[in-house]
Amino acid sequence: MQISNNLSTHNHLSRENIAREMGFKFNDINEILSNDMGHSMTFSKYARLDDKERAREYDRYDHSLTGFVKGEGEPKVSILGKLMGYDDAFSKDEIDELKKFIDDSGALGLERNPAFEPKGIFKDPLNSKKLSVDDFIDQFANKKILSFIAFGGSKTAELLDSDMSVDEFKGKWAKFALNERFGLELDEGLAKETINSINDLETQNEEDKKEKKFTPIQVTKKSQTYKLEADERFKEIYKFIKSEFDSGKSMFEILEKVAKLKVDKTA
């Protein structure tokens, strides 16, 4: 296509003249640039937004793993969004701690879209493999169709897309990770109690290092949700947890061993 030389120097690059030279009426291209995408969003407005704003204002309505809870209503930052830094009230230390918890579980990336797994699409280890949180965010966070193909309908997406509390997420993720990796079943309440106990032991350990003196570990912490002092069965498990912790076992190594004890604890 040859561009006409009849355009004035002042306005030859205006949108109107470019549109006319391309064979459009100005109103036609204007309609394209202001086309309604739905949810009060236009192409031109969407193009001006950053990734977080796109996810909050538009992508979350139809896509999972955007960093916001999927669906209608007021935008809510999801667990994945916290990990992506979308929650201003969630500190960097909290982000790092939650990332470490998920990374240590060794379960992120192992489960894929159940609609495709039976067909063997993700059986190749290059496709279905353990991922760090940072790698997961880089490869799949708010990737729309790719996110759906890889994780649509999965427990992974369900948990990361939720806006549950971090403590509740940890209990559910621990249960999921143990089942995904080892085929073990662990009661969610017991998982949370175990995690709380390990966190208390870690906190006490840090305090002991700072004070350079030993302070006996108490089974019951005021911060704990569960009344462990009323549960004799958990006191026995706690002794086991502390023994494993003192021997240098990681959180998920301890959780795995607790699950193998096959303790059926009820609230």
Image (cartoon, rainbow, N blue to C red):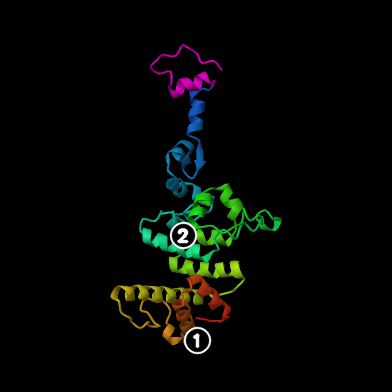
Q: Is residue 115 left or right of residue 245?
A: right
x and y, in percent, of residue 66 in the image: 49, 52
What residue is drawn where x is 58% and y is 55%?
Answer: 151
- Which stretch appears magenta? 1-23
Mark 1, other Cα within 10 Å: few <14 / some 14–19 / many ≥20 = few
Q: In which quarter of the image is residue 175?
A: bottom right
What residue is drawn where x is 47% and y is 42%?
Answer: 41
x and y, in percent, of residue 267 in the image: 50, 81
x and y, in percent, of residue 82 in the image: 43, 57
Amino acid marked by disc 2: Ile
Circle nearer the viewer, 2 or 1: 1
Q: What element carries label 1?
A: helix
Q: In this view, does 230 lie to the left or right of 136?
A: left
Q: How far apart are marks 2 and 1 (CA)?
A: 32 Å
The residue that mark 1 highlights is 233
Amino acid marked by disc 1: Arg
Q: Is mark 2 on a helix, strand or loop?
A: helix
Mark 2 / mark 1, whichever is N-terminal: 2
The residue that mark 2 highlights is 79
Residue lying furthest right in this view? 119
What residue is drawn where x is 60% and y is 53%?
Answer: 150
Closest to the observer: 250 or 1? Answer: 250
Q: Would you place residue 163 above or below residue 247 in this image?
A: above
User: Does 193 appear in magenta?
Assistant: no
